[in-house]
Image: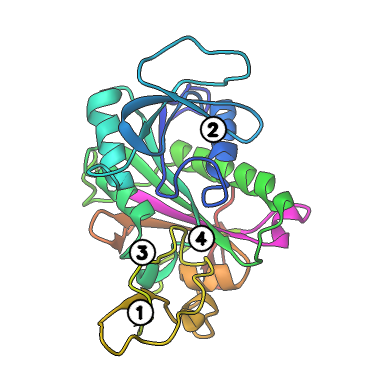
C-alpha cells in the first residue's frame, strides 16, 4: 500500500476518553490524521452520540446529532461504550459494519495504558481482542500498547512514543506481511505492537524496534481477599498500580483484583527474541499474529542482512 494514499483509520481503545486513565489516545489521533489520513476515533459507546474533541488534550463534548464543528474543535468522532457495548471489540465491529461500513482501511486498537506483551497479558487483553475481532472482519488491524515503567510516566515521553507508533504503523501498512493461512488474502491477520515508555525514546536515533514472538509465560494469584464488599478494580492496563487490599472478611467471600505481576513485569528469563525480552531490553516489539492467539509465520519477514545475532530487527 502506498504511503502517499490517504488511509482511513478506525481508532478504538478500552481506557475511555482523554484523561488520566487514557492519556495517549488523543496524541496518537493527531499523529494519525497528519501521517496516515482520516482517523475515525471510537472511544466510549454512549449509544451513538457524536464526540467533538478540542486542542490541546482532546477533551470535548458529546451531541445526540451530528453538527458543524465549533471553534477549537478538530474533528467529529463517535463515542461508543457502556453496557451492552462495553468492549473495544464491540466498538470496532459497530464502526466497521454500521457507522463506517466499507470505508475503513485499518483498525488501530490503542494506545493502551500499559503493555500487552507475553501470553499472560495477550490472552486477556481487550486491546488485542479488538484488533483480532477486526481482523476477523477482513480488515487490517494493529494493537498498540505503551508499557508503563516509570510512575507517573514523564510527559516528555508522550510525543516520541506517538511519533514512533505512527512510524511503525506506516511501515506495517507499506510492508504488510504474507502468511499462507491468513484469513485476508493470505496476509498476516494482525500485529501486536508494544512501546516501553522509557528514556530511550528520547535518545538520538530513536528506540530500537524488533520483530518478536510471544513470550509463552503464565501467572499465578490474581486476587486477594478483601474486607470491603464494594467492587474495586483498575480500569487501566497491567502496569497500573492497583494498590494493596485489606484483610479478608471472615463472613464473606469477597476478593479484590491484586495480581502478583513481579515476575511478568520484570522478567529475568524471557526467551531472546520474545516480546517480553524486547521490553526488558528497552526495545519496542512488533509481533505478527494470527487470529488464533498465535504468531504468524511470515514469508519474507526480514531480509537476511537485517538479522544480527539471531535478533530480527525492524528497520523503519
The one of 120 and 169 positioned closer to us in this rendering: 120
Task: Establish if 212 lies above or below 254.
Answer: above
Spatial CA span between label 2 and label 3? 24 Å
Camera-nearest residue between 108 and 2: 108
Whole-number angstrom distance, CA of label 1 to CA of label 4: 19 Å
Q: Check the image and name the residue furthest to the bottom.
A: 250
Q: Residue 101: give x, y in percent of width and height.
A: 25, 23
> Can residue 299 be spotted in the picture?
no
Residue ID for mark 3: 122
SS at circle 1: strand
The residue where tag 1 is placed is: 223
Q: Examine the rendering and report whether any part of residue 268 can be seen.
A: yes
Nearest to N terminus: mark 2 or mark 1: 2
Residue topped by disc 4:
114
As displayed, is residue 255 above or below residue 98?
below
Residue linked to disc 2: 32
Q: CA distance from mark 1 to mark 3?
A: 19 Å
Magenta region:
188-208
N-terminal-most mark, 4 or 3: 4
What secondary structure is found at the residue carrying circle 4?
loop
Quadrant including the N terminus: top left
Q: Residues within 10 Å of mark 3 (few under 14, many from 20)?
A: many
Amino acid at each position: 500500500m502506498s504511503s502517499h494514499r490517504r488511509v482511513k483509520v478506525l481508532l478504538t481503545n478500552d481506557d475511555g476518553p482523554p484523561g488520566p486513565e487514557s492519556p495517549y489516545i488523543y496524541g496518537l489521533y493527531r499523529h494519525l490524521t497528519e501521517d496516515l489520513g482520516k482517523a475515525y476515533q471510537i472511544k466510549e459507546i454512549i449509544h451513538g452520540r457524536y464526540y467533538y474533541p478540542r486542542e490541546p488534550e482532546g477533551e470535548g463534548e458529546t451531541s445526540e446529532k451530528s453538527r458543524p464543528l465549533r471553534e477549537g474543535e478538530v474533528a467529529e468522532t463517535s463515542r461508543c461504550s457502556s453496557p451492552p457495548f462495553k468492549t473495544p471489540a464491540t466498538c470496532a465491529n459497530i464502526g466497521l459494519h454500521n457507522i463506517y461500513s466499507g470505508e475503513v482501511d485499518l483498525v488501530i486498537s490503542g494506545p493502551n495504558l500499559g503493555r500487552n506483551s507475553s501470553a499472560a497479558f495477550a490472552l486477556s487483553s481487550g486491546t488485542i481482542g479488538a484488533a483480532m475481532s477486526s481482523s476477523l472482519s477482513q480488515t487490517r488491524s494493529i494493537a498498540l500498547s505503551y508499557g508503563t515503567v516509570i510512575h507517573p510516566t514523564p510527559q516528555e515521553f508522550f510525543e516520541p512514543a506517538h511519533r514512533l507508533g505512527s512510524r511503525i504503523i506506516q511501515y506495517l501498512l507499506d510492508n504488510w506481511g504474507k502468511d499462507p493461512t491468513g484469513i485476508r488474502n493470505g496476509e498476516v491477520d494482525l500485529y501486536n505492537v508494544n512501546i516501553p515508555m522509557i528514556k530511550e525514546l528520547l535518545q538520538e536515533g530513536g528506540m530500537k524496534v524488533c520483530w518478536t514472538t510471544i513470550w509463552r509465560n503464565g501467572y499465578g494469584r490474581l486476587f486477594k481477599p478483601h474486607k470491603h464488599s464494594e467492587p474495586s478494580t483498575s480500569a487501566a492496563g497491567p502496569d497500573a498500580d492497583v494498590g494493596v487490599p485489606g484483610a479478608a472478611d471472615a463472613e464473606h467471600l469477597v476478593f479484590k483484583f491484586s495480581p502478583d505481576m513481579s515476575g511478568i513485569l520484570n522478567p529475568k528469563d524471557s526467551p531472546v527474541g520474545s516480546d517480553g525480552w524486547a521490553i526488558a531490553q528497552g526495545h519496542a516489539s512488533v509481533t505478527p499474529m494470527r487470529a488464533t492467539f498465535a504468531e504468524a509465520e511470515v514469508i519474507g519477514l526480514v531480509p537476511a542482512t537485517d538479522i544480527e545475532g539471531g535478533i530480527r530487527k525492524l528497520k523503519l
